[in-house]
Amino acid sequence: MTDNKLWKIIQDIGWPEACITNKDNKEKRPYDVVGDRIAEKYPEYILELRNFAKKERKSLVSFLSGCGIRTGGDSGWDLTAHIIGCGENYLKDVKERVNAGEYTMDNIYDEIPWQENFEYSFSYAIEKIIGSEKASKKTRDSDYLEWLRNRKIDKIIN
């Protein structure tokens, strides 16, 4: 799938909206809401979406680091994953603001209303599909790949 299509899916699953409507909801956090949406609308693309989001986040971390903005640790991961979850246009806007000096190491964590953690959405989507909570990543991914193989076989047969 092209990067453009993956960005369109990220836009469609609505991370920014989930962050607003579920900000203080301890029962259904933004990553739960978005994980449900991914499982319902894009179940075949979860790993591809996860890998794309991770690749884009790492590219953003490299960019920010080159601009003197440290993004190590859990908060840095949450911030950069949030930016990716908000979509391609938001990412471009953040980069422009960093380049213009609007966002700096001193203010970026306060200026961007980030939420924990867009990338968790992919794990929750897989858990919803395979019906297994708190499984290890290796087991969860393996069970998901098995589900995916079976789904493709069912589509061929039927």
Image (cartoon, grey):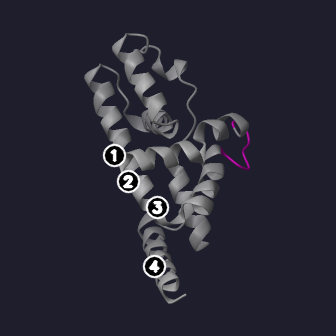
Q: Are marks 2 and 1 in contact (CB under 8 Å)?
A: yes
Q: Name which of mark 3 and mark 2 comes first in the sequence.
A: 3
Query: Type of residue at label 4?
Result: Glu
Secondary structure beneath label 2: helix
Query: Type of residue at label 1?
Result: Lys
Residue carrying label 1 = 55
Q: Name which of mark 3 and mark 4 comes first in the sequence.
A: 3
The answer to whether residue 9 is above or below residue 23 is below
Residue 13 coordinates in the image, percent (x, y): 58, 48
Secondary structure beneath label 3: helix
Report the Cα–Cα distance between label 3 and label 4.
14 Å
The answer to whether residue 13 is above or below residue 78 is below
Q: Are marks 2 and 4 in contact (CB under 8 Å)?
A: no
What range is drawn magenta here?
A: 23-29
- Tell me if residue 75 can be seen: yes
Residue carrying label 2 = 51
Residue 86 coordinates in the image, percent (x, y): 52, 35
